[in-house]
Every structure is written in structure tokens, then in C-alpha cells.
Amino acid sequence: MRQYFYDQYEVDTSKMTIPQYLLHMSKRDCNYRKLIDAIKSSCDDELLDIQYYPLHPFSDMPETVEICSSEIAKRWTANTNLRQIIHFKHKHFHTLNVLGKIVNILRQPSRGRHTNHMISIPQYYKSGVIQIKRIGVW
């Protein structure tokens, strides 16, 4: 269980490109499927019923994660391929105009290096609650 959270938060992001960093930050806050698998593997002997319930199951509004413009600027090189962002499968990367926000940061004279401007990107997974129940124990 500890390994799951270590893998999520102790990743060295310094070598990531802008598209890799965006996906990492978008997915970092809880891949509930992997978390459920980690719970099941850490409780081998117990019969558990594990259910995930999204907080807003019928909402199509994206939940967002804030990213500092300086993090984008650190990853910018003349060879950076931003076209990968266009091909992200998560539809809200397009509806929130993430590519446009990044281009605007990079167009600034300082390329966003000396600002603490925050941009919102969509969170890849919906927020929710994981319910864990023991099966057959009264």
C-alpha cells in the first residue's frame, strides 16, 4: 500500500517533457483502479467488497489541477513537441484549451520563468469515495 503512494508522489519530474508532465500531474491524484488493486493485494486473506463511487457521477464539468507556469517554462526547449497535447485522449484538455494556455505562457518575454501564474488542467480521474466492506463477517 505504501508503495502505491510512494510511486505516485516520489516521481522525478525534472526530465519530463511538457506533455509528459501535464499527463503526470493530471493523473497523479488518484487512479482509483490502481488504488483498489493495491488495497486488494495488501489484504490477501480477507474477502473484501471494494466499490468506487464518483462524487458527481452525472457531471460533465472537468475537475482541475493547478500547475505553475514556471514548471512549464522549465521544460521548454526549442525541440519541444507540443502537438502531442492535441492527441491527448482526455476531452477536457481540449475544452479547457490547455495547449492555448501553454502557448500564451511561452509567448511571454520571460517565457513564464519569473512568474507564479497558475494554469488549470483537467484532472484525469473523477474524484470519489472508495467504500471497503468485509464480506461474510458479522
Image (cartoon, rainbow, N blue to C red):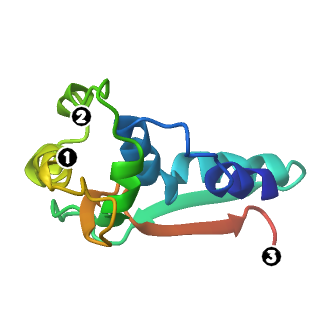
Q: Looking at this view, is 134 or 118 the one in front?
A: 118
Disc 1 element: helix
Q: Where is residue 136 in the image (x, y as percent from the top left)?
A: 78, 63
Tag 2: amino acid:
Ile
Nearer-the-camera pick, 57 or 62: 62
Relative vertical location of residue 4 with respect to residue 67 in this rendering, above or below: above
Q: Mark 1 points at which residue?
A: 93
Q: Disc 1 versus disc 2: distance between alpha carbons?
A: 8 Å
Label 3 or label 1, whichever comes before in sequence order: 1
The amino acid type of the residue labelled 3 equals Trp
- Give the image location of residue 12, x and y in percent: 63, 46
Above or below, 122 against 78 in this view is below
Residue 85, labelled with which disc? 2
Asked which quadrant contains residue 80, the reply is top left
In this picture, residue 44 sits left or right of residue 6: right
Q: Where is residue 72 in the image (x, y as percent from the top left)?
A: 34, 51
Lateral position of residue 42 relative to residue 118, left or right: right
Q: Is residue 57 visible?
A: yes
Q: In this view, does 86 lie to the left or right of 34?
A: left
Q: Give the residue type at disc 1.
A: Phe
Residue at image mark 3: 138
User: Element under label 2?
Assistant: helix
Dot placed on the residue nearer the N-terminal end, 1 or 2: 2
Q: How crowded is mark 3: few (under 14 residues within 10 Å), some or many (20 or more)?
A: few
First in sequence, mark 2 or 3: give its number.
2
Residue lying at the far bottom of the rendered structure: 138
Which residue occupies the foreground of this view, 132 or 7? 7
